[in-house]
Image (spheres, rainbow, N blue to C red):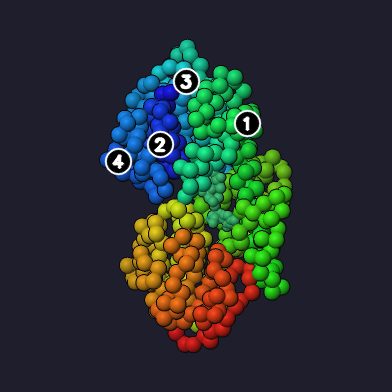
Amino acid sequence: MELCVIGAGYVGLVTAACFAQMGNRVVCLERDHVRLARLRQGQCPIYEPGLAALLQEGRRSGLLSFTEDWEQALARAEVVFIAVGTPSQEDGSADLQHVLAVAESLGRQLPRPCLVVNKSTSPVGTVERIAAQIGSGLRERAVAFAVEVASNPEFLKEGSAVEDFMRPDRIILGSDSPVARERLQRLYAPFVRNRERVLCMSPRAAEFSKYAANAFLASKISFINELAGLCAQLEVDIEQVRRGIGSDPRIGSDFIYAGCGYGGSCFPKDVRALIHTAEQQGYQPTILRAVQARNAQQKTLLFKALEQHFGGFLRERRVAVWGLAFKPGTDDVREAPSLVLLEALLDAGVRVQACDPAALASVAALYAQAVSSGQLTLVEDPYTCAEGADALVLVTEWKQFRQPDFRHIRGLMRMPVLFDGRNIYDPSELSSLGYLYHGIGRPVVGHCKVTAA
Ligand SMILES: NC(=O)C1=CN([C@@H]2O[C@H](COP(=O)(O)OP(=O)(O)OC[C@H]3O[C@@H](n4cnc5c(N)ncnc54)[C@H](O)[C@@H]3O)[C@@H](O)[C@H]2O)C=CC1
Ligand SMILES: O=C(O)[C@H]1O[C@H](OP(=O)(O)OP(=O)(O)OC[C@H]2O[C@@H](n3ccc(=O)[nH]c3=O)[C@H](O)[C@@H]2O)[C@H](O)[C@@H](O)[C@@H]1O
């Protein structure tokens, strides 16, 4: 099929590259010149496992190209995907300016009938707004054809985006038109052997399903985090409780890992947007507000634990931070728990040395002043990062941090104190190596006397 994907971000790029891999001809339209130039040179502008290879292949086969020119992008398109950002506005609602700007351009530029599919996470009723916007453009041009608009929310996760797109749990097609459904079913057929994984529904139900999924997953995380806080007070290890409840298939073992909070470009913004939608309807989103409040508290826990550990002597300490991306496998730091910790540490006059396999450049850009003053040092190597530290804090559980040589690290650190923000280490092993271990919702294990900075 001839496809156009608008927006070359995490979703647009993965969508374009995966559809091209399945033999479709895809033109991806991107308005950011820097990003476009890199893509045209064959570079992958984001860190996403497997994506660079797919982009190369699309380039070699000639099935994938990039442009900023609407005429070129739409010349042959049978299906146009919208994959632009829908960030939060100040009141929490989803900002649809990019989606509607694209709809306006489509109304002005579409050369022939086609199917427009919205992949951006957008509130209920957005498909209708896109259709109205395109329709008014077509009418102004006195064009005699109609354009169908469907919703096809995306469920990929950063860090495993290509894998998720290639092997989806389900595909949601929100359209009342049998022709549009049939066309999308055909397009997605190579990704789903089992046709039952393709779920057809109304556009409004599809739009709502996306928010429901993210809000439910965020709720699971906040729920386990709330219990973790109680475990900490009762001398119970949340990790044992997690295993105890996760083995019940009605609960399931996914997304019940306690930690220092959820981040990223989606859970926080989508929970906010759903709360806003509910409030607009005069409906009280009691649970969603609690999910959000618990997550905000959770992101402050590591700093509070450090403060408590060092008493009044936090200033001038050296703290090593392992992991800055909001999750492993990405360079994305949007709403990352690491940023809340960094901010608090820098404010408290702490000297921070941090490392991350992919997100150093993003953090360097955000904290340029702290980097140039020397208060924040960004390094590649986890061992260098730990040198001279009074405490080590694990924030993002990259594979690189899972089995370090803690015996060696003990010799590098000034004080062997470990704050495990993702509960990935074995407390008894660490205490046997002489560490003081703090987890999230786990008893503190080991001893370490606080000495002067
Ligand atoms: N990041 C993720 O893992 C997922 C994101 N989503 C949703 O997908 C949507 C896109 O998210 P991301 O890909 O993360 O966003 P992003 O911010 O990484 O990428 C959006 C891209 O669209 C481009 N763009 C914006 N307006 C444009 C226009 N008028 N013409 C051409 N290009 C334009 C931007 O320059 C940017 O490169 C959002 O609604 C998000 O909630 C859904 C599932 C997963
Ligand atoms: O709409 C979106 O953008 C996407 O949002 C999430 O994907 P993503 O944010 O990329 O990553 P997740 O793996 O869901 O992790 C989100 C956050 O939750 C945290 N998390 C996850 C799982 C868990 O058990 N505990 C926990 O704290 C992670 O550390 C991370 O900060 C959803 O999982 C995707 O299905 C969805 O498409």
Identify residue type, mark 1.
Glu
Tell us which disc is closer to us: 3 or 4. Answer: 4
Instruction: Tell me the quadrant of the picture where the C terminus can be found.
Output: bottom left
Rendered location of residue 231, percent (x, y): 69, 69
Q: Nearer the viewer, residue 302 or 168?
A: 168
Q: CA distance from mark 1 to mark 2?
A: 24 Å
- Which quadrant of the structure image shows residue 361? bottom left
Q: CA distance from mark 4 to mark 2?
A: 12 Å
Tell us which disc is closer to us: 1 or 3. Answer: 1
Q: Is mark 3 within 8 Å of ligand 1?
A: no
Q: Which of disc 2 and disc 4 is earlier in sequence?
A: 2
Q: CA distance from mark 3 to mark 4?
A: 29 Å
Label 1, on which residue? 196
Q: CA distance from mark 1 to mark 3?
A: 26 Å
Identify residue type, mark 2.
Ala
Residue 42 got which mark?
4
